[in-house]
Amino acid sequence: MSENHTAGEAEGDRLLRLLALDESDLDVISAHLQDASVRHEDLHYLPRERRFVLALHRFDWQRAPGEAPRRRLTALHFEQVRAVRHRYLEKAESGLPLNLLAVYFLEGDKPSGAVILEFSGGAAIRLEVECIEAQMKDLGPMWEVENRPVHRPDDGGDGGSDAGKT
């Protein structure tokens, strides 16, 4: 896992840059992206480049509970993508943002497999990849949002997040 910060920024304001080349690296990216909101128009598959790119509004989980919740524009891309499948993206197609819950890898014939982007409400994107090769990069300053995402077992995974209030 590679992590870079911009010099001169306060600890919580640093721009993250993460590289994932294995499952444990991908777990770190997943933790940083939990509850990120994603719009349909920010999902892009580039088959000629074998790349899948998305822009997210990443929730800043490093903030203390008493501090105002914040988000930051973040880019994520996967290389060596052979195919993309998805389910239940109708919510995003209608203009409502998706709430990212987790990013994980399902092993196939080593080193290939599938990267799964799992969203609330049962939506998911499956990337068939030759290997794990992903990069996450913060793109700019943070902004305050109204709510901190909350997860309740009875809410169907939507978590009552602020995903629609970015």
Image (tube, rainbow, N blue to C red):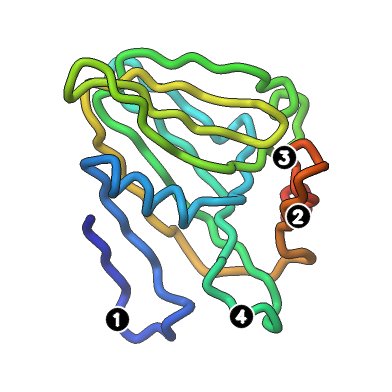
In 3D space, how far apart are the residues under numbered discs 2 and 1 (Cα atoms)? 30 Å
Residue type highlighted by circle 3: Gly
Tag on residue 157? 3
Work out whether mark 4 precedes mark 1 in sequence or the reverse, and give the earlier one.
1
Q: Nearer the viewer, residue 92 or 151?
A: 151
Front: mark 1 or 3: 3
Q: Nearer the viewer, residue 110 or 17?
A: 110
**Residue depicted at x 23% and y 55%:** 1
- How far across and down, in percent of the image, does residue 20 sit? 27, 46
Front: mark 4 or 3: 3
User: Tag 1, which secondary structure?
Assistant: loop
Give residue 147's quadrant in the image: bottom right
Work out whether mark 4 precedes mark 3 in sequence or the reverse, and give the earlier one.
4
In 3D space, how far apart are the residues under numbered discs 4 and 1 (Cα atoms)? 22 Å
Asked if the residues shown at circle 3 and circle 2 are in contact, with their CB atoms under 8 angstroms apart, the answer is no
* Residue named by callout 1: 7
Asked if the residues shown at circle 2 and circle 4 are in contact, with their CB atoms under 8 angstroms apart, the answer is no
User: Tag 3, which secondary structure?
Assistant: loop
- The reply, left or right, for residue 94 in relation to residue 1 is right
- The residue sitting at the left extreme is 110
Q: Residues within 10 Å of mark 4 (few under 14, many from 20)?
A: few
Residue 107's place in the image compared with 59, above or below, is above
* Residue named by callout 2: 162
In 3D space, how far apart are the residues under numbered discs 4 and 3 (Cα atoms)? 23 Å
Q: Residues within 10 Å of mark 3 (few under 14, many from 20)?
A: some
* Residue named by callout 4: 64
Work out whether mark 1 precedes mark 3 in sequence or the reverse, and give the earlier one.
1
